[in-house]
Image (tube, rainbow, N blue to C red):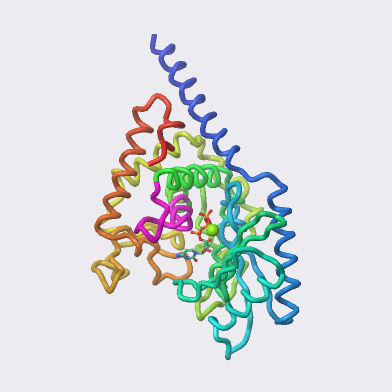
Amino acid sequence: RNLRKMMECRSDINRLNNHFLLIYESLTPPGEEKTRQKQLLTLLERLVNKEWPEARLYLYGSCANSFGVCKSDIDVCLAIQDAEIDKSKLLVKLADILKSDNLQNVQPLVHARVPIVKFMDPVTGVSCDICINNVLAVINTKLLRDYAQIDVRLRQLAYIVKHWAKSRRVNETYQGTLSSYAYVLMCIHFLQQRRPAILPCLQEIEPTYSVTVDGIECAYFDQVEKLQDYGSRNKETIAQLVWAFFNYWAYRHDYTNSVISVRTGCLLSKQAKDWTRRIGNDRHLICIEDPFDTKHDLGRVVDKSSIKVLREEFERAAAIMQHDPSPWITLFEPY
Ligand code: CTP
Ligand code: MG
């Protein structure tokens, strides 16, 4: 009887896993989307270099970090070395150039926290944000992409967590919930903490890549092709990891004292980072250290009411993973 129960249980787990894998696959963008993005980037390079021959364009965010689902917008960074530049003027000028090339809905947002120009390309249907000299974002995009090469379970988990966060409306920084970037860091940290570990800590290995950006040294081991087998001793499946991820954030994380840190692969104490009290608008109610800009807590957008919303959503997700007969549906029910 026990054997039969065990077999039934195993087939339930397999079924659950297959459902999650199907969701992951359905969210993965088709190859042609990359082609359309490249096409748009080539057009932008032509336009930008006509005006600023020295400028370079870099993709960052989900179109380049391998955590982009279908139909994502693209994020572009315009890197221009000119001590004299006035970002606002440059963005307005860039907007004029884009308009005169018939790009649609061109809007310079000069007062945003990260000033950008937004527009849509009617030929490829791709929407795009361009920022100026946000080079750190280009580097952290590479870090995320390198982590994604090591074990496919990171991409699977992050896709599911991002899809859950968007469905449940807890991926809205202007409402006090977390950015996609923060969720991916939570996934990386979580996989660094599994035993046996599924991901290494790339910043703790002898660096093979190193750049200094805005006075911050960004160095880590980037020869990830040498780490292909890293997670193979851990046999956990995506369904188990989704369960454990939500369980961790619902019941196990110490919100009062801990900071998650991908940079060290460990938990740090809030005390050590001096993130124990509110300073200005930074409340540190959930602490996620940026891997390079270590003064930056990705959780700083979270306030007293949104932390409640977030934790209730983690608890809801954990309960669904524990008890619901079809979590692959219930988990993503729109809020
Ligand atoms: N970023 C950052 N610091 C933040 C937020 C974002 O450096 N506090 C940078 C990161 O390089 C990140 C990029 O901006 O990859 C885009 O952030 P976000 O929109 O949160 O992530 P995406 O991966 O683009 O997710 P989505 O699919 O939701 O667009
Ligand atoms: Mg984005």
Kindly indicate the quadrant of the structure image that contains residue 82.
Answer: bottom right
User: Which stretch is magenta?
Assistant: 169-187
> On the picture, is 313 further left or further right than 156?
left
Query: What percent of the width, then of the height, locates residue 53?
Result: 74, 81
Quadrant the N terminus occupies = top left
User: In this rendering, is residue 49 above or below 66?
Assistant: below
Query: What percent of the width, then of the height, locates residue 202?
Result: 53, 60
Quadrant the C terminus occupies = top left
Q: Compare residues 186 and 225 and report the one nearer the observer.
A: 186
Query: What percent of the width, then of the height, locates residue 169?
Result: 40, 48
* Residue at figure coordinates x 34%, y 37% from the top left: 318
> On the picture, is 124 further left or further right than 212?
right
Kindly indicate the quadrant of the structure image that contains residue 126.
Answer: bottom right
Is residue 210 one of those drawn in magenta? no
* Residue at figure coordinates x 44%, y 43% from the top left: 167
Furthest residue toward bottom: 84
Q: How many marks?
A: 0
Q: Compare residues 244 and 93 and report the one nearer the observer.
A: 93
Furthest residue toward top: 1
Query: What percent of the width, then of the height, locates residue 290?
Result: 44, 65
Is residue 173 one of those drawn in magenta? yes
